[in-house]
Amino acid sequence: IAGITQAPTSQILAAGRRMTLRCTQDMRHNAMYWYRQDLGLGLRLIHYSNTAGTTGKGEVPDGYSVSRANTDDFPLTLASAVPSQTSVYFCASSQGEGGGYTFGSGTRLTVV
Amino acid sequence: GQNIDQPTEMTATEGAIVQINCTYQTSGFNGLFWYQQHAGEAPTFLSYNVLDGLEEKGRFSSFLSRSKGYSYLLLKELQMKDSASYLCAAMDSNYQLIWGAGTKLIIKP
């Protein structure tokens, strides 16, 4: 089934630990995005990639890093987690230039 | 700056009609999207408007006025399953979506 797969579904993480959220798509979409969603704030863009090999910073990039080694994968890394990074994280992809976004099912991360 | 405004919450009755408004301000404009998000789930695509006017898709319709920076989502014959958040998003000149905070729609029997 074509779409986006995120892993893990949920995670409880100790503060200070390193964590990588995985995102894989099989639609051959050029653009991929990482968002965090917090109650009352809507979706906020963390990082994006318009094509394999390139990445860019979104609205809230601090504390996060990404890589885009190939078209399908776009992992998000928290180098040293802090409680304010407790959130639901969504990965999305699009063909680009006017195409709608397809979202993964999300990762619920709790940093304690 | 770039900004999307939509009401935080709306309540409607099963079987009725509800209109969710959205105003936007973006650097460039490449279309207006509406997404539906049920609690605990991912957003799913509902509609896309890039030209002025009304787009109808079953019980859901979406309207766009580019000159006014305004869109609305119209939901007819409301069903309990329509209880969800509705997200308005405008695509800017870089083809990135600028998101509103979402409108939580509560349907009462």
Image (spheres, rainbow, N blue to C red):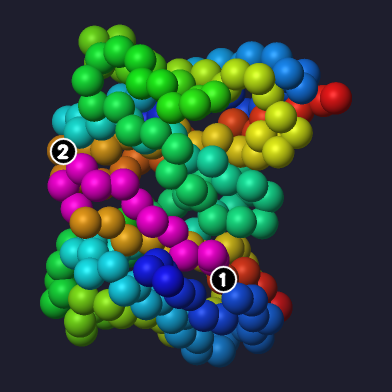
Q: Residue at x 19, y 53 (%)?
A: A96
Res A107 label: 1
In this rendered view, identify the residue nearer to me: B94 or A25.
A25
Q: Tag 1's secondary structure?
A: strand
Q: Position of residue A94 (x, y in %)?
A: 27, 56
In the drawing, does residue A90 fall left or right of residue B39? left
Res B93 label: 2
Say if residue A55 shows up in the picture: no
Q: Position of residue A73 (x, y in %)?
A: 31, 79
In this rendered view, identify the residue nearer to me: A45 or A94.
A94
User: Chain letter of disc 2?
Assistant: B
Q: Position of residue B15 (x, y in %)?
A: 73, 18
Q: Amino acid at mark 2?
A: Ser
Q: Please tell me whether residue A9 is drawn above or below residue B97 in the rendered image.
A: below
Q: Position of residue B99 (x, y in %)?
A: 41, 40
Q: Main secondary structure of the magenta part?
A: loop
Q: Residue at x 22, y 37 (%)?
A: B92
Quarter containing the C terminus of chain A = bottom right
Give the quadrant of residue B65: top left
Q: CA distance from mark 2 to mark 1?
A: 29 Å
Quarter containing the N terminus of chain A = bottom left
- Identify the magenta region: A96-106
Q: Amino acid at mark 1?
A: Thr
